[in-house]
Image (cartoon, helix red, strand yellow):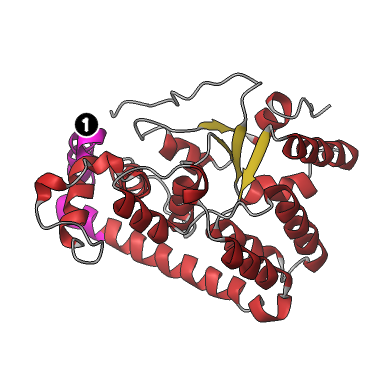
């Protein structure tokens, strides 16, 4: 059994928090079946106050915006409320897309800091305007659903094919050995990725001049999450979901903050398998109590 990892991030309540709310978390701030609307309204106001005071910064990702589009076909008014509030608290903190973040890390030869992780202002304004133009993005939720379904079918077929070829018990045994030392295994996969993409990433031909794989945080985290999902899906027979690919990008984005808010059990189980966790992973209720001082009752 692979080791279960916990976050090594610790900070006091006086330090500034960089927060990443996943799709459900930001939606829950608008409405939640087991939370009083009055309490949620107080929570939204409290979070706004913390953002205004500079003690909290909220970050947005492309994948978060795309997933939120799923609200639009069934509840346009909720979509408008959630999107408006999200941009109010996030301001211009739009994180680079995973691919662009990886390229920027390679160009810098290390982890991005401060505004280096963000889209340029003009691009952020353009994205904000697109989010407000419902007509221009109305078809995207259906494409997202289709992509989820395709991914789920392909991944399940691949898993079933491997099990049929090798046998369920043997596949599980192989994957448990494969994931016994995840950090070095991830390093190997990232090194292989860099070798295959040397020209595209503009890496020097002399490999001795390359930083270690862990220096490229987004690339390393992207591979780490996908590999952890392979271990859980194939090695332990966990359910494969179409949204797994989106969760990979959520995880990369959250790795450039220090608090991620998510109730997604699969995501939380996957994070527990990844070493050197860079952020505190909190449930919606934990975040409300610990960071906003608001309790359910």
In the image, taking residue 267 as reference, residue 198 lies left or right, namely: left
Q: Nearer the viewer, residue 87 or 39?
A: 87
Q: Is residue 178 magenta?
A: yes
Quadrant in the picture for the C terminus: top right
The reply to whether residue 31 is visible in this rendering is no
Locate residue 64, reporting x and y percent: 58, 56
**Vertical position of residue 86 compared to residue 151: above or below:** above
Q: Which residue lies under the disc numbered 1? A: 181
Q: Residue at image x 54%, y 33%?
A: 281
Q: Quadrant of residue 18?
A: top right
Q: Quadrant of residue 52?
A: top right
Dot 1 lies on which element? loop
The reply to whether residue 189 is visible in this rendering is yes
Q: Nearer the viewer, residue 13 or 66?
A: 13
Of all residues shown, which one is farthest toward the right?
A: 38
Around disc 1, counting alpha carbons within 10 Å, would you say few (fewer than 14), some (14 to 19), or many (20 or more)? few
Q: Nearer the viewer, residue 86 or 146?
A: 86
**Vertical position of residue 85 compared to residue 179: above or below:** below
Q: Residue at image x 49%, y 37%?
A: 268
Quadrant in the picture for the N terminus: top left
Segment colored magenta: 161-185
Q: Nearer the viewer, residue 74 or 202?
A: 202
**Vertical position of residue 230 compared to residue 260: above or below:** below
Locate residue 271, reporting x and y percent: 43, 37
Q: Residue at image x 24%, y 66%?
A: 200
Locate residue 257, reporting x and y percent: 52, 39
């Amino acid at each position: 059994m692979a080791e279960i990892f916990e976050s090594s991030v610790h900070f006091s309540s006086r330090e500034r928090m960089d927060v990443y709310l996943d799709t459900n978390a930001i939606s829950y701030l608008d409405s939640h079946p087991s939370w009083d609307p009055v309490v949620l309204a107080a929570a939204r106001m409290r979070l706004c106050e913390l953002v205004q005071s500079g003690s909290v910064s909220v970050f947005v990702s492309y994948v978060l915006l795309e997933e939120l589009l799923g609200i639009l076909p069934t509840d346009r008014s909720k979509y408008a409320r959630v999107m408006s509030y999200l941009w109010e608290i996030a301001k211009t903190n739009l994180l680079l897309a995973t691919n662009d973040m990886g390229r920027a890390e390679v160009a810098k030869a290390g982890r991005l800091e401060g505004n280096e992780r963000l889209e340029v202002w003009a691009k952020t304004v353009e994205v904000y305007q697109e989010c407000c133009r419902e007509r221009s993005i109305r078809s995207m939720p259906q494409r997202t659903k289709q992509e989820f379904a395709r991914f789920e079918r392909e991944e399940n077929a691949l898993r079933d094919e491997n099990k049929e070829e090798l046998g369920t018990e043997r596949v599980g045994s192989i994957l448990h050995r494969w994931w016994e030392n995840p950090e070095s295994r991830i390093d190997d996969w990232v090194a292989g990725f860099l070798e295959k993409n040397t020209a595209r990433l503009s890496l020097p031909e002399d490999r001795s001049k390359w930083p270690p794989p862990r220096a490229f945080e987004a690339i390393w985290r992207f591979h780490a999450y996908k590999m952890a999902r392979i271990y859980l899906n194939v090695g332990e027979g966990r359910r494969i979901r179409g949204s797994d690919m989106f969760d990979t990008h959520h995880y990369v984005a959250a790795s450039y903050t220090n608090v991620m808010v998510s109730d997604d059990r699969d995501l939380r189980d996957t994070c527990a398998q990844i070493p050197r966790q860079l952020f505190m992973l909190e449930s919606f209720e934990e975040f409300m109590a610990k960071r906003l001082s608001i309790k359910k009752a």
